[in-house]
Image (cartoon, coloured by chain):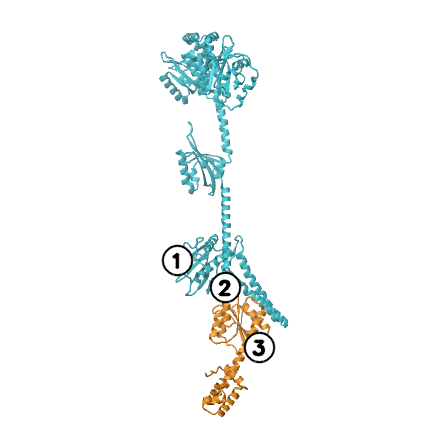
Chain colours: A orange, B cyan
Amino acid sequence: MEPDKLVFVVDDDAPLRDSLADLLRSIGLRVETFASAQEFLQSKRPDMPSCLVLDVRLKGLSGLDLQKRLIAGDIEIPIIFITGHGDVPMTVQAMKAGAVEFLTKPFRDQDLLDAVQQALERDCKVRAQRAEIAELHSRFESLTPREREVMALVVAGLLNKQVAAELGTSEASVKVHRQHVMEKLGAGSLAELVRIADKLKIPTPT
Amino acid sequence: VTESAKSKNDVPLETSIPGGAVSLESILCTEELHRRPWRAPDHGRENRALVALVSALADSPGTILQTLAEEVLEVLQADSAGLSLLTNDEKRFYWAAIAGAWQPHIGGGTPRDFGPCGDVLDGNMPMLFTHWERRYPYLQSATPLAEEGLLVPFYVNGKAVGTIWAIAHHNRRKFDAEDLRLLESLSRFASTAYQAVASIDDLKFQIAEREKAETALQELAKGLEAKVRRLVDSNIIGIFIWGLDGRIIDANEAFLRVVGYDCEDLLSGRVSWRELTPDEWQASKERALAQLAATGVCDPFENEFFRKDGSRVPILLGAALFEEGRDEGVAFVLDLTERKLVAEEALRTSEERWRAVFDNSAIGVALTDLSGRLLATNSAYQKMLGYTEEEFGKVTFLELTHEDYREANWKLITELLEGKRKQFQIEKQYWRKDGSLIWVSNNVSLVPGTKSMPRFIMALSEDITARKQAEEAARASERRYHEVEMAHANRIATIGQLSASIAHEVNQPLASVVTSASACLRWLDTQKLDEARRSATRAMEEGHRASEIIGRIRALAKKAPPQKDWLDVNETIHDVIALARSEIQRNGVALETDLSEHVPLVLADRVELQQVILNLMMNAVEAMSGVSDGPRELLVRSGTDESEQVMISVQDSGPGIDPENLDHLFKAFYTTKPQGLGMGLAISRSIIEAHGGRLWATVNAPRGAVFQFVLPVGREQVA
C-alpha cells in the first residue's frame, strides 16, 4: 500500500471509471473518482503526491479544457490522458501542455500502471523541489539588508576586498557578514552558496 | 364432215395412239370429284339457265346448242364449255358449239376412237380428265391447254350422240360433284329440249348441212307449239297454262304431282292458281305479277303452293305471258321440297356446329348490338362475369366495364362502327356480379349484317387476371428488392459515417473489460477473492455491453428482407442513440430526449425504423455542424398525435430549411451536402410509407428544422 500517494480518475463512463479505480487499487494506490471535470475542480484535494487519469472526451468541460484550467490556476498535477481513439493533433496539444502519457483505449494495464507510477514519481520530485526552495526562501528572508548585499556581490564572483570597496566598508566587516550569510543559508562552500542563489533566482549585479 | 368444216379444223386427224403415250387411267381423275369439297347448290342460277334454254327453244331454236354451251360455261363457272356431236360417218366428233376461251376452235373436233369424247361414250359415264394432251398429243394445239376437262355423255332418245363438256384452263378452278350434277342436269334438259327441236335424223342432217339445218330449224320453229307440247309432256318440270283470272287452262303431269290435284280438279275451274299461294307468300307473287305485266316475263322466284290435302309445297315459280291477248301465259313449277330439306338440314347441322363451338369455347364470347347491349353470351363469358344469360339481357358491356376504361373502349367501338378499323384488342377490367374486378383481354370486331340479320359486335374475351396478378407481383417484388438494396446501401453508408463513433462505443466497454480483467488477476495474486470476483463480474458485464453494440451494428449492416415485429419506439430510439452518441458529442451537439412513457407498440421492422431515426439524427447533426454560433441542440421526441398514431420527431437548431426546398427534400438524389448521396430522406420516406405512415419536415422556430413521422398503432399497449 502506498496510502501517501493518490490517483484521481475523471471519466464520464461509469463502468470504465470503476475499472480504472479497481485496477489502481489492486496495486495498493489510493484512488478518487469523478464523473466530470467540474466535479474534480470543485473537490477538495489533500496535499500529497498525486496524479490525474483523465478521459479526453467528457460531457461538458473536455479533458483538454480541464488541463488548460489547471495550468491557468497554477495547479501542478501530472496528467495521464486516455482516449477512445488516437487523435494526433489532440495528443500533440496535450503532450505540449505537459501531459505525462496519452493512452488509447483499450490500453494495456501495465502501460497505465507504468504511466501512473511515473507521474507519481514526478509529482514527488516536484513536491520535494518545491519544499527545498520554500526552506531556502525562509532562510534568505532572515538575512539583514547588508548581508543580502554582501551575498549578491560574493556570488557574482567578487573578492572580499572588492566587496568592501564596493560597499565602502572594511574588508574585516565583509568577512563577518559573509560568515553570517553562509551560516544562515547552510552553505558549506562558495560553490554551494552560488547554487542556492541560483535556486532562489537572486539577480546578479552586472 | 364437210370440207368446209374440215378446213376449220385446226386439229390434225390422228387415229393411232403414238408410242410412249400415257395410259387412259393416268389422265383420268373422276373419283376425285367426290372427294373434293362441294360448293353449295345455287338453285336460282340453275333455274335461270333452264329458263334461258326454254326461252332459246321458244325464240331461236337454231342457237339452242350455243345457248347450252354458254349456260354450261356460266353455271359451272368454267373457262370453256361446249358440245361435241358424232358425225354421220361416226368417225369423228364435231365441236358444234363452244363458249369461253375455246370459242375460236368452234367447228374443230376429235377422232371417234382416240380422244376424250370417245372415252366417255365408250365408258358411257361422266369423266374428269386432267391434261389430256399427255395421251392425245393433237390436243396440244388446242390452246389454251386444259387443266381439267369434265365430260358427260349427251343422249338423244336414249342414244349417245356426243358429249357436253366444261374445261378449266387454270388449276385454281377444280370441278366438284356439284359441277357434275349441274352438267348432268343441263345435259338431261338439253337432251329433252333437243328432242323437241329435232329428231335424230334432223340432228344428223343439221350436223352434215349446217345451212340446211338452220333452215329446217326455222321451219321447225313454226310448229313450235307441238314441240313445246313435247317439253310439257316430258314432265321434267311442272308446267301449266294460266289465265290472269286465276284459271288453270292446262297443266302437265309433273304439275299435278306437285300440287296433288288431278286433271279434273283443275280443268273444272274449281281451283284458282291465285288461291294456291298462302297469305305470307302473296307479296312475292304480287311482285312477280307486276314484273310480268311490265315485261311479259318474271324472274323465277321462290313461293309456296297449297296442295290438295292442305299441306304446303315449296316451289320455284317462273312465268311468261303469251304475246297474243296478254291475258294468258305459261308458268313452270319446280318442286323444292327435297332441296329445301337438304338445305335446311345442312343449315341446321351448320347452326348446331357453330352453336356447339360457341357454347364450348374456352374463351368468352359476347355478341352485342351497336349500342353495346348484350344479345348473346356463351357459358365461358357468363361464368367469367358471374351473370346468367337472362341477367346479361339487361346490361350493356360498357356498364360491366370498369369506369377507367369506358371512354377509351367506347372510342374504339365508335371507330369500329365508322369503319376506321376492322377490329381492335383491348386489355381492361370488368366488374363481376359479385363486385370483384377481373382483368380481360378482348378482341372485338364488327360482324357485317345479312338480309335477315342486322350487323352486330362480337367480343372474344379472355380472363387474364392471373397473368396480370403475376405480373404485378413480379413488379412489386422487383421494386421491393430494389428498395431493400437501396436501404441497405444507405445503412452501410451511414455506418461508414459513424465509424469513429462506433469505434469509440465499442472501445469503451473493451477498455473496461481489459482493465477489470487485469485488476482481477492482481487481486487473485494477493488472494483478495471478493475484490477479484467483483472485477471479473464487471469484466463480464462490460463484455456483454460491447457485444450488444456490435450486435446492433451487425443488425444494421445486415441485408435481410424486412420483418415486422411489435416494437416499442422508445427502445428503438435508445438503440440508435447508443450508436450515434459519440458522433453527436464529437460535433459538440447537446442531445436531449423527450420520450413519452405511454407510447403504443407499432408493427414495424426494427432495423428499418432504426435506419429512419438514425438518418434524421445524422442529418440534424450535420446541419448543425456548420453553425459556428448559437447552441447546437438536438431534441428527439416520441408521443402520440391527436389521432392516437405514434409520432416521432427530430428537431435541431441548425440553419433550417428554405421553405422552397421542403418539396424537394424527399426526392432521390436531392442533397445540400457536398458528400451526400441524397438518398437518405427518400429512403426514409419510402420506409415509413411502406409501414403505412407518413414522414414530413417543417421549419422550427426560431431556428432549425423538425423532421417527424407518424406510424399507425397496433392494438397492444405498452404496459
Q: Amino acid at mark 2?
A: Ser
Q: Residue at x 54, y 55 (%)?
A: B558
Q: Amino acid at mark 3?
A: Pro
Quadrant of the rendered image containing residue B682: bottom left
Residue B357 seen from this side: yes
Query: What residue is pinned by disc 2?
Result: B582
The answer for which chain carries disc 2 is B
Question: What is the x, y in percent for residue B472?
Answer: 49, 45
> Element under label 2?
helix
The answer for which chain carries disc 3 is A
Q: How many marks?
A: 3
Query: What residue is pinned by disc 1?
Result: B658
Query: What residue is pinned by disc 3?
Result: A3
Instruction: Out of B367 and B383, give the one closest to the viewer.
Output: B367
Question: What is the x, y in percent for residue A36?
Answer: 50, 70
Instruction: Out of B456 and A1, give the one closest to the viewer.
Output: A1
Q: Callout 1: 10 Å neighbours few (<14), some, many (20+)?
A: few
Q: Is residue B344 above or below residue B510?
A: above
Instruction: Out of B84 and B185, give the one closest to the viewer.
Output: B84
Question: What is the x, y in percent for residue A88?
Answer: 51, 66
Q: Tell me whether marks 1 and 2 sit on the same chain.
A: yes
Q: Callout 2: 10 Å neighbours few (<14), some, many (20+)?
A: many
Q: Amino acid at mark 1?
A: Asp
> Element under label 1?
loop
Spatial CA distance of label 1 from label 3 is 63 Å
Question: What is the x, y in percent for residue B185?
Answer: 48, 17
* First along the sequence among labels 1 and 2: 2
Spatial CA distance of label 1 from label 2 is 29 Å
Q: Residue at x 44, y 40 (%)?
A: B400
